[in-house]
């Protein structure tokens, strides 16, 4: 009967045919099976049958055989989370009851993992499989068998590679940590595995890796640590220098862990020289204040512990920086000589090419408007490449090879700089004609590099005059706000380019990035330069310019968004007149994202900028800022793609609560409003954020929201997903939260007691049971009389429920007898 009902072909909607939101596996409203009302009863029957003491294992294993188990495992790919949850519980019972099937179940799950990692990267039940394996690994006997270690190396570690890691990372991290806790010698293997699959372009994934790394290091002993510390701290040094402030911040938080700090200090002679350059660069020029402060704290730890070694590393760093500067200068001098030699040698070749090209009037000139002819070809080595026809019939304007700025007198530098800016206004087609105009593209790229260098090196030359600012913003606008380039790029993208979680490609990459990156660098240096007069610049970097800049945040190229974030932060800090406009425009984009489209690539970057802005809000908070919290930040929790920006959002919300503790009630009620119903990993995110908010909550605000909050926590405690229940129980480990609960135990304990009592007696996960017993003991010790009262009430309610169930059963039996007797009468007639 079970086979006839549940074993069916799963027909998931093809992911490639779904819109971009459907690519997010974190759906709050996943695909639900229409047959579930019947299937649920079949699963419930089967679960009771397997768990029943009346079921003879020896007899049952002839029918619940390997073929049956294999088909059961295939059902884990169902898109209905309710079905996967039932399957998880049933498989756990089968594994516990039918010992003969244990090797086969482990082997079959391995095969599913292999296919997922190395072939498809598509499966809906990976999180559930890992949750079951977490309990299985927990029960492994010591010493660990070789097959279990092979499973760690060949299955669990490669599971860090798929793009959808965040869907199952918590369960995977739990499994990995279990192995290291059971055999600390595996720590070296695990850490080197993490380094092998370390994400390159995905910042939120890097933060996940750093979280897992800390848990692994906590269980690592010095001998294993010393084997892998060199490659490990090379990677940590890169994380410390990350432009994404949360990656750098998370890496610096490793020093807050006492065990890890001890390991580092024991091997400081090796580790400090590796990470010192990263720490020093952060201390000198990292844009984020929190990262800057944490870096200074870490530097002070090393300095206090070993002052002599610290001074030696500092001297070595300064020496290396000096050598690097000299090497750079030599390299530039060498290239200059090569360019000059090449220009002399190729002069005749250029003249021959110019003679063969068709003479057409140029559609745009990049010299002063007052001149009717281009500059003389022989002027200080200047050469001109005339206009060429592109394949689509449009003309590409002439590009000049102008003299280098360092080669002309100071009096002529400004005029030449303006000419170079006009030259850089030429926009090439990198999408449909990537191989066309290669020489002109290279000339433009070199010119862009030179104008960036000019802005950087013009430190003591006085303020930039208005014509320079005007031409600079024109050049930036021509390159960044060019609609043709962006339209052609989006038009030519494949459907795979829509994946927001690409690790290797890092999202859809703009083919014109080699030029755009230098333009962004130029704008960043221009805005940050002390030679840029804000009063003059605001005429050109005006609201229209800022609006177009904000529109670019929807770019699918993560590299572009990273630059835009830094530039917007600088503009907000420098142009105070634009601050209200920037906040208002960002609000409008976020409103559009929440209430209409649900699609935008740059939400995480916007929130990161807003985090710094909120950090600088003066007290008391203005009413408009409180409205922004309630109308924008809190509703952002309801989107399906929340994992893409939750860390940044959580940081913004907590900033508000820390500034004004009276907002805690509003924020907590907002979280409860958008609390996920069927998404366990999202629930864990909400619980993490909730704990941080409660840490800043005072007793008065807590009392206002504790009843609905306690009801939600009770539901989490009763969750069959062990990590949700576990995370809810961990709230009692927080001293401040535990104190708030203790002060209001008369109201909270009656609400959460039934959930705790049921967990303690019947939850399938042993870790949840143990944590529940600890919490019950804490509550019992705090107020024994109230605890006994709640226990009596719970037992009475349980007894009443049993009585009602019996009455209902008796009533239904009587009704069935009446119906049956009437049926017999009608049949006789």
Image (cartoon, rainbow, N blue to C red):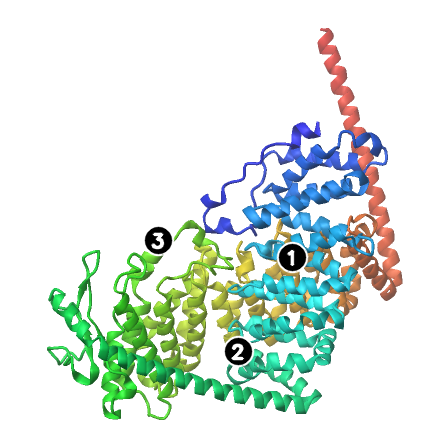
Q: In which quarter of the image is the N terminus?
A: top right
For mark 2, what is the residue? Answer: 288
Residue 157, disc: 1
Which of the two marks, 1 or 2, is nearer to us in this view?
Answer: 1
Which badge, 1 or 3, comes first in the chain's sequence? 1
Within-10-Å neighbours for mark 1: few <14, some 14–19, many 20+: many
Tell me whether circle 2 and circle 3 mark residues in contact (CB < 8 Å): no
For mark 3, what is the residue? Answer: 492
Q: Where is residue 43 in the image (x, y as percent from the top left)?
A: 70, 36
Which badge, 1 or 2, comes first in the chain's sequence? 1
Q: What separation in Å lies between label 1 and label 2 (alpha carbons)? A: 33 Å
Q: Where is residue 693 in the image (x, y as percent from the top left)?
A: 64, 68
Q: In which quarter of the image is residue 341?
A: bottom left
Query: In the image shown, does 509 or 110 lie closer to the viewer?
Result: 110
589 versus 568 height, above or below: above
Q: Where is residue 534 in the image (x, y as percent from the top left)?
A: 35, 84
Query: In the image shown, does 156 or 170 lie closer to the viewer?
Result: 156
Q: Residue at x 33, y 68 (%)?
A: 480
Which of the two marks, 2 or 3, is nearer to us in this view?
Answer: 3
Query: In the image shown, does 782 or 734 lie closer to the viewer?
Result: 734
Residue 279 located left or right of residue 432: right
């Amino acid at each position: 009967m079970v086979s006839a009902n549940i074993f069916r072909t799963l027909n998931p909607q093809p992911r490639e045919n779904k819109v971009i939101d459907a690519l997010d596996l974190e759906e709050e409203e996943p695909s639900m099976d229409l047959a579930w009302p019947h299937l649920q009863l079949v699963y419930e029957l089967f679960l009771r049958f397997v768990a029943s003491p009346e079921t003879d294992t020896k007899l049952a294993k002839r029918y619940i055989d390997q073929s049956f188990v294999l088909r059961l495992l295939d059902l884990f790919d169902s898109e209905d989370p309710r079905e996967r949850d039932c399957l998880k519980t049933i498989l756990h019972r089968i594994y516990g009851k039918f010992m003969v099937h244990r090797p086969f179940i482990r082997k079959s799950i391995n095969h599913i993992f292999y296919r997922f990692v190395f072939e498809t990267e598509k499966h809906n039940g990976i999180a559930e499989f890992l949750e079951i394996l977490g309990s299985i690994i927990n029960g492994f006997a010591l010493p660990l068998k070789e097959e279990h270690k092979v499973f760690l190396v060949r299955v669990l570690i490669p599971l860090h590679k798929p793009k959808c890691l965040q869907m199952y990372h918590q369960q995977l991290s739990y499994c990995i940590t279990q192995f290291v806790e059971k055999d600390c010698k595996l720590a070296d293997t695990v850490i080197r595995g993490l380094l092998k699959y370390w994400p390159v372009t995905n910042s939120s994934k890097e933060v996940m890796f750093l979280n897992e790394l800390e848990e692994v290091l906590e269980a690592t002993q010095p001998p294993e640590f010393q084997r892998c510390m060199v490659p490990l701290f090379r990677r940590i040094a890169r994380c410390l220098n990350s432009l994404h402030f949360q990656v750098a911040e998370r890496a610096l938080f490793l020093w807050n862990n006492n065990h890890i700090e001890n390991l580092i200090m024991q091997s400081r002679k090796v580790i400090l020289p590796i990470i010192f350059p990263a720490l020093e660069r952060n201390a000198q020029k990292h844009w984020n204040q929190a990262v800057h402060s944490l870096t200074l704290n870490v530097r002070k730890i090393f300095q206090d512990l070993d002052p002599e070694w610290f001074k030696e590393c500092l001297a070595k760093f300064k020496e290396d920086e000096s050598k690097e500067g000299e090497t750079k200068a030599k390299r530039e001098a060498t290239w200059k000589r090569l360019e000059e030699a090449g220009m002399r040698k190729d002069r005749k070749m250029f003249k021959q090419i110019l003679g063969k090209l068709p003479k057409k009037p140029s559609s745009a000139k990049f010299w002063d408007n007052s001149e009717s002819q281009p500059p003389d070809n022989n002027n200080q080595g200047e050469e001109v490449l005339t206009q060429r026809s592109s394949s689509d019939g449009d003309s590409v304007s002439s590009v000049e090879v102008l003299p280098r700025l360092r080669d002309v007198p100071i009096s002529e530098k400004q005029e030449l700089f303006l000419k170079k800016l006009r030259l850089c206004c030429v926009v090439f087609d990198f999408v449909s004609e990537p191989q066309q105009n290669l020489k002109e593209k290279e000339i433009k790229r070199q010119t862009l590099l030179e104008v960036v260098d000019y802005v950087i090196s013009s430190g003591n030359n006085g303020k930039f005059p208005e014509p320079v600012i005007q031409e600079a913003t024109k050049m930036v606008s021509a390159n960044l706000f060019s609609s043709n380039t962006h339209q052609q790029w989006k038009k030519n993208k494949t459907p795979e380019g829509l994946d927001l979680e690409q690790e290797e490609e890092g999202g859809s990459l703009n083919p014109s990035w080699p030029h755009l990156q230098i333009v962004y660098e130029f704008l960043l240096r221009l805005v940050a330069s002390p030679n840029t007069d804000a009063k003059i610049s605001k005429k050109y970097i005006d609201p229209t310019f800022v609006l177009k800049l904000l529109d670019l945040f929807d770019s699918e190229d993560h590299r572009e968004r990273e630059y835009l974030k830094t530039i917007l932060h600088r503009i907000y800090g420098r142009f105070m007149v634009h601050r209200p406009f920037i906040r208002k425009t960002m609000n409008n984009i976020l409103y559009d994202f929440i209430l209409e489209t649900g699609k935008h690539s740059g939400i995480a970057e916007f929130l990161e900028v807003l985090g710094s802005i909120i950090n600088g809000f003066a007290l008391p908070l203005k009413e408009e800022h409180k409205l922004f919290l309630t109308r924008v930040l809190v509703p952002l929790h309801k989107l399906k793609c929340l994992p893409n920006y939750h860390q940044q959002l959580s940081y913004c919300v907590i900033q508000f609560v820390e500034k004004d503790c009276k907002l805690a009630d509003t924020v907590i009620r907002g979280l409860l409003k958008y609390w996920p119903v069927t998404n366990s990993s999202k629930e864990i995110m909400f619980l993490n954020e909730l704990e941080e908010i409660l840490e800043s909550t005072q007793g008065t605000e807590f009392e206002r929201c504790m009843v609905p909050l306690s009801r939600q926590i009770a539901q989490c405690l009763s969750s069959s997903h062990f990590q949700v229940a576990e995370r809810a129980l961990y709230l009692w480990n927080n001293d401040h939260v535990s104190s708030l609960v203790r002060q209001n135990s008369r109201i909270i304990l009656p609400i959460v007691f039934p959930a705790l009592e049921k967990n303690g007696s019947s939850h399938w996960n042993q870790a949840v049971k143990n944590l529940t017993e600890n919490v019950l003991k804490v509550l019992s010790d705090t107020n024994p009389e109230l605890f006994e009262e709640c226990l009596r009430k719970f037992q009475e309610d349980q007894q009443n429920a049993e009585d009602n169930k019996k009455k209902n059963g008796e009533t239904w039996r009587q009704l069935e007898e009446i119906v049956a007797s009437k049926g017999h009468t009608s049949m006789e007639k």
